[in-house]
Image: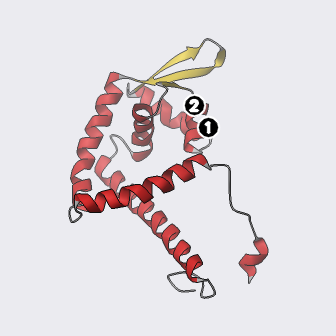
Amino acid sequence: MSDSGPDNLTERERLLWELLTSVGICAQLLTTRATEVLGAELPPPQFTMLNHFVRVPPPVKTVGDIARAFQSPQPGITKTAQKLIAKGFLAAQDDPEDGRRKLLSVTDAGRAAHMAALVRLRPDADLIFGGWSDGDLENLKEPLFRLKYWLDNNRDHLGSRQPDAAKK
């Protein structure tokens, strides 16, 4: 197997392999950079949750809502939410319809922490894209957003699994 995938792939399969591998590598490298920039004050899981509250309606969410959006198990989401509540970045109220659930919302302090994190991330974003023209960024935006929207809207649709194909 070469860096561009198994040798018996068609040109399209090789291109798909290279694209998906590159997206995965970018995700890992960007997460590592964000961890370094954001530090222990607001690690990426907490920043990501705040970002979700700031960007995505409705303003009030349950742990189950967030777990579905993040495709993550509820215990991990609960742990991150508890840390944000302890910092005063999220508020939790009892759900009047279900006493077992909490209704979570971002606080003014959470919005301020989110904005401060964006300010800390800005120099690295400028460094990453420093050699890119506005046109380059616009050209990247369309296919990247197309991929993001497709993945977001097809969360439960996975390609067929072919265990025998992996053995060839």
Q: Quadrant of residue 13?
A: bottom right
Dot 2: what SS? helix
* Residue 75 percent coordinates (x, y): 60, 38
Query: The N terminus lies in which quarter of the figure?
Result: bottom right
Asked if 84 appears above or below 73 in the picture, the reply is: above
Task: Give me the disc on residue 66.
Answer: none
Query: The C terminus lies in which quarter of the figure?
Result: bottom right
Count of all numbered marks drawn on residues in the image: 2
Task: Give me the disc on residue 63.
Answer: 2
Location of mark 1 (residue): 74
Q: How is the image coloured?
A: secondary structure
Residue beneath the point at 77% across and 71% down? 163
* Residue 60 percent coordinates (x, y): 50, 23
Residue 85 or residue 63, whichever sits in front? 63
- Amino acid type, callout 2: Val
Q: Is there CB contact under 8 Å for labels 2 and 1?
A: yes
- Label 1 crowd (10 A; few <14 / some 14-19 / many >=20): some
